[in-house]
Image (tube, rainbow, N blue to C red):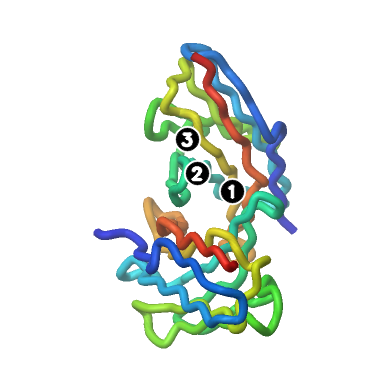
Amino acid sequence: DAGVIQSPRHEVTEMGQEVTLRCKPISGHNSLFWYRQTMMRGLELLIYFNNNVPIDDSGMPEDRFSAKMPNASFSTLKIQPSEPRDSAVYFCASRGTSSGVETQYFGPGTRLLVL
Amino acid sequence: AQSVTQLGSHVSVSEGALVLLRCNYSSSVPPYLFWYVQYPNQGLQLLLKYTSAATLVKGINGFEAEFKKSETSFHLTKPSAHMSDAAEYFCAVSDPSTGNQFYFGTGTSLTVIP
């Protein structure tokens, strides 16, 4: 299995621009999570989906952030407009059952820099 | 509600010395417990997990962790540190009674001194 795939791996953009991060979960996993990691705040859960339906988006910072999961194999996290404080590493994770236990598997992350 | 506490945000050990990273959890029911490792500029990688099959769990790269219900702990250990073990380590708990939502600790940065 290829694991969780994220693209792009690095993104540099200017303040005010739209940013779209993409994620392909592990095939067969029915839950998908978006996290943000910064030095100041550590690892934060932004939103997660079960069976393509958003379950908890209480971690989404503000209306500039939105996430979609149109099908079981693809999700996007969009920031519009982007701001310098959005600079962080964004991780996608999918969850599936391994040895009878639901386990999260992380992608390599997208490193975002907003100038 | 679940919570995870990792004591010590930074731990330094000498190469060859014992590694001990602490994790305590709060849970009203037996949870599932995990350790993840994050190497520089990489994602989180599953190191090991407790599934109630055995209290001593062995993971990758020589790491192991012991579930102690009486102490609500799941400390991570390795007998002999290697330079390549330098990384950030995250403890996480999953509560089956709340839909298996994950709760992560704040992480412990391990430095290995040559």
Instruction: Give the mark, 1 or 3, whose residue is nearer the N terminus.
Output: 3
Which residue is labeled 3 in the image?
A: B54
Residue sitting farthest toward the left: A1
Q: The disc labelled 2 sits on which kind of residue? A: Tyr
- Position in image of residue A85 (x %, y %): 68, 66
In terms of secondary structure, where does tag 1 sit? strand
* Amino acid bearing label 1: Ala
Give the residue at mark 2: B36
- B30 versus A28 height, above or below: above
Where is residue B47 drawn, in percent x and y? 44, 40
Instruction: In this rendered view, identify the residue nearer to me: B84 or A85.
Output: A85
The mark lying in front, picked from 1 and 3, is 1
Q: Image point 53% across, 82% down: which residue?
A: A18
Q: Are marks 1 and 3 in contact (CB under 8 Å)?
A: no
**Residue B78 seen anywhere in this rendered image of the structure:** yes
Separation of residues labelled 2 and 1 (CA atoms): 8 Å
Mark nearer the N terminus (2 vs 1):
2
